Structure formats: C-alpha cells, structure tokens
Amino acid sequence: MYLQRLEIKGFKSFANKTRLDFKPGVTCIVGPNGSGKSNLVDALRWGLGEQSLKNLRGKKSTDIIFSGSDKASRQNLAEVSIDIDNPQRQAIDYTNLLITRRIYLNGEGEYLINESKSRLQDILFLLAKISFGQKNYSIISQGEIDSIIKATPQERRDYFNEAVGVKQYQFKQEKAINKLKSVQENLEQTQLTLKEIIPQLTSLTRQVKRLEKREKIEQELESYQTTYYAHLWQQINQQQAKLKINFDNLNQKIDQAQTEFNQAKNKIDQIKIKPTRSQLFDQLQEKYQHIIDLQNQLRQKEFELKSQLIQIPTQNISIQLTPQLLNKIIQDLKNIIEIQDKILSQINQQSLENLQQVLIKNNQQLKILSQQLSPTRDNSAQKELNKKINEQLAKISQDLQTNQDNLKNVQQEISDFNKTQETKNQQLFKQQEELQQKQFELNELNSQLNEVKIDLARIEVRQEDLMREIEQDFVGKNIDQIKKCPATTQPNSEEIKSEIYKLKHQLEIIGGIDPETVQEYTLIKERYDFLNHQVEDLNQAIQSLEKIIKELNQKIKNQFEEKFETINKEFNKFFTSFFDGGKAELILKKEETTTIEENEELDPEFQIGQDIPDETLDSETSKRQTPLDKILKIINQTSYKSIEIHATPPGKKLKNIEMLSGGEKALTSLALICAIISSNPPPFIILDEVDAALDENNSHKFAKILKDLAHKTQFIVITHNRYTMEIGEILYGVTMSQDGISKIVSLKLDDK
C-alpha cells in the first residue's frame, strides 16, 4: 500500500488543478523558499481530515482556498484528492482508496471515499487501520522534528498510540465507551421512568384485580342467570310450541269442517234448485184441468150430437121422446155437469181415488143417456145421418175413454208426486239437520282456535316481558346464548334466585369501575414491560460493551507492550547509529491507581432485569459505582502516565533530553521516528525539511537510513539537502510564477 496520486485544486497557492504521481521508494520535492512546497504537505494533511487550523497555518476554514492575486481570480472551492494503492484490500474492499475533501467559500464542506459521500470519522478509522495518523510520525511538518521531544505526556501518548498501531482499537474502544455512556444514561433514565410509573401501575393493578374479581363474579352470575332464564325461556317456548301444534291442528280441523259444511250446503242448494212442490203440483193440476176441460168439450160435443138425434122426427125414432123424457135427460146432463164442477172444485180436498169413482159413475150415467137417445128405426137417409152421428159419438166416446185413461195417469202422477215430495222433504230436513251440526262443530272449532290465539298472545307477551327483564338484568353480553341454551332438567329456581341475589349484592359492594381502567392499565403495563425489557436489554448491552471494551483494552495493552519493546530496541539502534555510540531508551510510567481485578463484576444492585419493587433507586444509588466508572478504572489501570525519553550521547552522562543541544534533539527525534517506522511502518511518510538542522555528516547518515527504510514504507520528502535528493527516485520541483500560483516540474531520476 502506498500513495500513488495527489490532486490539488484551489488549495492555497495551487489555484490550478495540479497532479502529482508517486511510486514506492523516496520522492523528493524541492524548490525555493515561498514557492509552495509546504502547501503540498498541508494539502495532504487537510485531505486526510486535519481539523486544526493552527497546523494548517490558517485562522479560518476558508483560508485554505486560493484567495487570488493581481493576475488570477479567487477560487470558489478547494479540493484535494488522495489516491492510495490498496492491492491487499487492507483498509477497504477496493484495490484503490480514493479520499476526497472539498470546502466551499460559504464554509460548507464534504468528504468522499471512492466518490461516495462519507464522514470524517470513517476516514480517520480507515487511516487508523492502515497505521496512518495525523499527529504522529506519518506527517512531520517543517520545524516539528523535535516536537516529540517537547510534547506533553498526553501528546506523547497519542503519538505512541499511533506508533504502535493501536489507534484503530482505541477508536473502537472510544466508540464502545461512548455507547456505554449512552446506554448507561438511557438505563438511568429508564429507571427513573419506571420509578415514576410504578405507583400508578400499582394502583391500576389493584383496580384491575378488583375488576378481575368483578368479572369472575359476573361470569358466575352470568352462568346462574343463563340457567335460570334459559329454563324460563325454554319453558315458554315449549308452551308456545304446544299451542302452535294445537293451533295448526285446529286450523286443519276447521278447514275440514268448513269443507264438510260447504258440501252439506251445496247439497241443500241442489235440492232447492229442483222444482218445488207447489210448482210440480201446479203443473199436474194444469194437466189435470186440461184433461177435464177436454172431457167437458167432448161431453158438450156429444151432447150436441145427441141433441141432433133428438131433433129427428118422431116417426123416425123408435122411442118417442116426450117432453118429460127430454127434460129428464137434460136434467141428468146438468147433474153430470154439476158433479164434474164439484169434482173440479174439490180436487184439492178429496183424494184422487174418490174422484176416480165419481168420474166412473158419471161415465156410466152418460152411457145410459146415450143409449136412451139411440134411435130405434132408421131409413136410409136417416140412417146415414144417424150413422155419422153415431160414428162421431163413438169417436167422442173413444176420446172420452182415452181422456179418462189420461186422467187416471195424471191422478197416478199426483199420487207419485206426493210420495216423492214426502221423501224429498225428509231428505231436506236431514240435510238441514246435518248442516246445523256442521255449523255447530265449525263454531266450536273457531271458538277453540280463538282461545289458542289468546293463549299464544299471552305467551308472546310473556316472552317480551322476559326478554325485557333479561336485557335489563342479564350481565352477559350475548343474549342469544340464552335462546340457544339447550333445555335442561328442572332447576331449583329458589336456590338459583338466591345465588343471583348474593352475586348481585357482591357486585354492588365492589362498585363500578371505570371501563377505561383496563385500557389504561394495559398501556401502563405494556410501557412498564417495555421499559423493563429495555432495562434487561440495556444491562445485556452494558455487559456486552464491558466485554468488548475489556477485550479491546487487553488487545491494546498487549500490542502496545509488544510494539513498545520493539520500538525501544530500534530506538537505541538508530540512536547509536546517528551518534556513533551512546545509549537511548524509552521509560514507560503507568498510572498510580487502586488495584481492580479485570474480571470484577458490576454492583448487583445495579443489575435491573427483573420486576422493580416499589422502593426503587434512592439517593445512595448515585454514589454507587457505575459500569462506566469501573470500565474507566480498568482502562486507567492498564494505561500509562507518561513516556520518558532517556538519551545519552557517547562521552556524556546526560539522561534528561532537555539537556541536549538542538542538533542532538533533532537527531534523537529522527532516531525515534526511524525506530517507529522500522517497527510499524505506515503506507507513506511525509517529511517537511526535517534534515534542515543536520550537518553534512548527519545528513549523509540520515539519507542512508531513509534509503534503508524505503523498502518498508514510501517517503515523500521536502528537502534542500543534496544527500537526500540523491536517494530520491522521483524529483518534483515547485516554482511560483508572477501570478502567485505554484506549479510543479517533475523529474524521474531513475531514467537518467
């Protein structure tokens, strides 16, 4: 790993974009005073994250931006890009590590790693991983060669922390300590919050327990009420079911009775539709009267014919008709007519048999009269006339006989009619009685149906009253469970009512509880559990951080002691090389602290992973040792107070470096820097005129040592010393033109 490219734009005197390419080995940068050589060192220092304006020789952050000159305008930003070759991917998982830093005139700046925005902390951590630092031997500015000799104990400790390569672990340790501090603060804050909510949680817990007791009583009450009301409900439902069955049966019977009633009524209507007795009798009477009228007509005609016979001369008649005889015949005919009139007038009063006998008797008289009027002698004309009259009389007599037969038939029909009418009347009376019976049965069924309807209405009212009572008194939320509850055996209602009364009384004693109490308790309990869990997590985090810090501290201690011993040996080696003898050593002085076992556990009372009691942290808690205090004590135990440098040039007995001359201090510092480079070489080192105070002999020694160390690290040296220039593989010259802008001239010496 080495620095392969440096690009500068707008930084101090390098207004224009300037690029310097480097290779492993020694690169020398030369130029007259004031040309801008040190600005290159400042650019590297600034690009790698330097924050001290004093080290950058400025007063404010924008002083590093090219401010312009008489012939060049001011730049609006300063940018430095440092390209480090990383073939083994030590610092980052790329073959090249490109660090870029920019700053604008408004003071805003940014960092980039491989052209991605990043943080300063990330850059410093990457540099620590590759053993490169800003405050150690990696960059030594002009006049700072003996800074390690003059450094304070804290500055010297920082110097050696980077020198032994533990800076990256210290970054991690410092980050873990800061996180431990933050976790500890969070833990303390969480404890205080828990202390505040515990009284409230305790009060809510009591209320919730009362509520749980109330819920238990309500569940028991609900069970009793469910049994009690379910029995009443099922009882009513059973009664209602029976009534509905009876209702349905009555409806069926009523339908059947109505059908039978309608059938009986239809039979009566059919009987009534037939001709009535008076109508049939009138028809028969009309027929009978018609026969009588026809018979009278025949009798009248017969009488007229016989009268014609009577008017024939006496001599022509065998029997002489005297006036007395004629009057007698006439009188007999009138009697017959009167008898027939009586028959007609008495036809409704006498039976048909009597009428028949009267009619037979009249016919016999008519025959006698006919015989009496029959002629005894005849002449031819008279005979002919008599013959015709007799024929007509015979015809009339025949018609009278036919009419007589018809009359008998009518009389028989009248007799049959009376019999049929009697049977019909009996059927009608029977159907009317049956209809009355069906009507009575139908009325009885309707009466029963009305009673069932009334009972059903009462059952519905009882259901509504029971449901209203359940809605007002039932403690359960689901009333349907009562309706769905299966029928059970007959419960002891009095005992159940007594238990219900007792449970209600207990609920009254408990009293009402705000329904939001449970919600509030749930929120507070969730918060308490969350905080309690957080306390457990924080304690685990503290333990984990303790372990990490202890491991890092042990690693730092082991690596520091190992590297420090190597540096101490190399320091004496390079010191004797510079001074051709003598002795030099580093003395490590540790902090004077009370002995603390590294595996000492935290105060048990500080562990908070379980439920916190009501009496929580008191005033003495703040006096107890916190995990951070113990960790810091452990770190202080392994830390050192200061590093003393003892250097004794040959022929002298001095140990205090303050007694050395300026040249001796410079050589001692160079010996220490070379010792550090030899034991823990960084990717590259920038030396700004560190050989300015050396004489020719020591300059030659210094150049030789740089050449020997060049295979371990890359050197970028700003120098005026010819011995140093001779070992350089690349030589850059820096000049400044009249416009105040620095320029670079390069020369590869190995090409000569």
Image: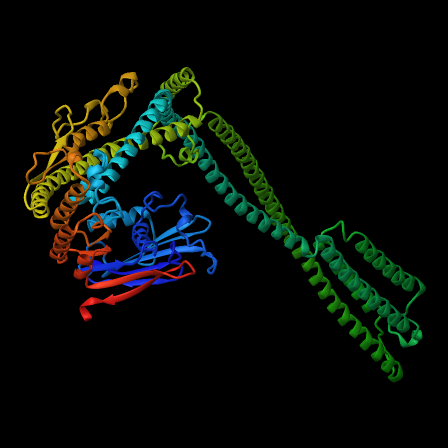
In this picture, residue 746 sits left or right of residue 326: left
Q: Quadrant where the C terminus lies?
A: bottom left
Where does the image place residue 693, in percent across and percent down from the top left?
Answer: 21, 47
The foreground one among 570 and 595 is: 570
Residue 102 seen: yes
The foreground one among 298 and 621 is: 621
What's the colour scheme?
Answer: rainbow
Where does the image place residue 366, in percent across and percent down from the top left?
Answer: 80, 64
Q: How many marks?
A: 0
Residue 170 seen: no
The quarter of the displayed image where residue 359 is located: bottom right
In this picture, residue 291 sits left or right of residue 561: right
Q: In the rendered view, would you say 118 is above or below 471? A: below
Q: In the rendered view, would you say 91 is above or below 240? A: below
Please give the name of the residue rendered at 80% of the width and 72% of the height, measured from the top-left corner.
396
Q: Quadrant where the N terminus lies?
A: bottom left
The foreground one among 681 and 549 is: 681
In this picture, residue 2 sits left or right of residue 393: left
Q: In the rendered view, would you say 119 is above or below 506? A: below
Q: Residue furthest bottom?
A: 380
Where does the image place residue 533, in percent across and percent down from the top left?
Answer: 28, 33
The quarter of the displayed image where residue 499 is located: top left
Where does the image place residue 545, in percent across and percent down from the top left?
Answer: 21, 36
